[in-house]
Image (tube, helix red, strand yellow):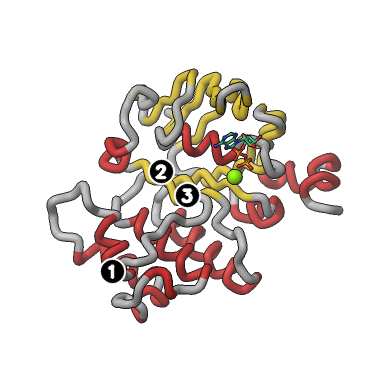
């Protein structure tokens, strides 16, 4: 059973057709990446799944149609998006940002905070610091930590490496792998195709609003066309 399935998903911005009928699925426990050039429609696809954009076509999550539901109802179902540009609340502290990730829950959040701090020790050291004073990499970790506070089953990550120094990129991706090992299914959007394919089991290639190829990460890495266009070799 697919955890997530999109059937003929389309997103328009006025006359601009950003996503032109894409169909794909993700099984529970997989790390799947969506690679593609700037403007290919990756962010629009993730936003439509998270119900932050209107779309047509069907989106099924655990065999339930979710394309008719409001965005806020998805968090309780275990679907979380870490948006492009992170979207942390810069004037709130790290701790306040994390607590907001669990706003829909009425039970205690201490155990989740501890888990996030174990996974992301840099945040623990900065718990009372305003999020706006964190480095880009720390803000990315906070955005991931905040999503984890909702106890996601499916995590959608949009360009987690964007704008980060190479060492910080490695750290963020170590965290992503650990989260996956703990059983969270991940849909990763990444312009850094090499890094994405090194991290994922399977990948979809998106071009001009279409999915043009799907294969195992291993096969995509050795595919001559993918190597030339996306891996620069
Ligand atoms: N808010 C918007 N208004 C109009 N066009 C948009 C908007 N956001 C994205 N687009 C257009 O939709 C297409 C896909 O964008 P996007 O989904 O952000 O691609 P990607 O994440 O792959 O870079 C692009 O042509 C982009 O210019
Ligand atoms: Mg994008």
Q: Which residue is mark 1?
A: 95
Element assignment for label 3:
loop
- Residue 83's disc is 3
Residue 110 appears in the figure: yes
Q: Earlier in the sequence, mark 2 or mark 1?
A: 1
Q: Position of residue 41 (x, y in %)?
A: 62, 35
Q: Which of 144/87 is in front?
A: 87
Give the label, 3 or 2, closer to the camera: 3
Q: Earlier in the sequence, mark 3 or mark 1?
A: 3
The residue located at (21%, 47%) in the rendering is 104
The residues tagged by marks 3 and 2 sit, at their Cα atoms, a distance apart of: 14 Å
Q: Earlier in the sequence, mark 3 or mark 2?
A: 3
Q: Which residue is mark 2?
A: 154
Give the label, 2 or 1, closer to the camera: 1
Q: Quadrant of ligand 2?
A: top right
Q: Are marks 3 and 2 in contact (CB under 8 Å)?
A: no
When asked about the image quadrant of residue 119, the answer is: bottom left
Q: Is residue 217 left or right of residue 119?
A: right
Element assignment for label 2:
strand
């Amino acid at each position: 059973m697919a955890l997530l399935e999109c059937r003929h998903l389309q997103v328009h911005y006025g006359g601009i057709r950003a996503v032109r009928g894409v169909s794909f699925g993700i099984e529970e426990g997989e790390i799947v990446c969506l690679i593609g050039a700037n403007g290919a429609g990756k962010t629009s696809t993730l936003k439509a799944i998270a119900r932050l954009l209107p779309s047509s076509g069907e989106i099924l999550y655990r065999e339930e149609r979710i394309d008719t539901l409001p965005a806020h109802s998805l968090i309780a179902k275990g679907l979380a998006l870490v948006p492009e540009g992170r979207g942390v609340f810069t004037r709130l502290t790290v701790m306040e940002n994390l607590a907001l990730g669990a706003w829909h829950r009425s039970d205690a959040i201490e155990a989740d905070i501890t888990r996030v701090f174990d996974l992301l020790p840099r945040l623990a050291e900065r718990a009372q610091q305003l999020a706006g004073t964190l480095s880009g990499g720390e803000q990315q970790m906070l955005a991931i930590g905040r999503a984890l506070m909702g106890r996601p089953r499916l995590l959608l990550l949009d360009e987690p490496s964007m704008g980060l120094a190479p060492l910080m990129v490695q750290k963020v991706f170590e965290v992503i792998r650990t989260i996956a090992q703990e059983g969270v299914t991940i849909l990763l959007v990444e312009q850094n195709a090499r890094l994405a394919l090194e991290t994922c089991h399977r990948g979809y290639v998106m071009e001009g609003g279409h999915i043009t190829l799907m294969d195992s990460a291993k096969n995509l890495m050795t595919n001559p066309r993918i190597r030339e266009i996306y891996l620069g070799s």
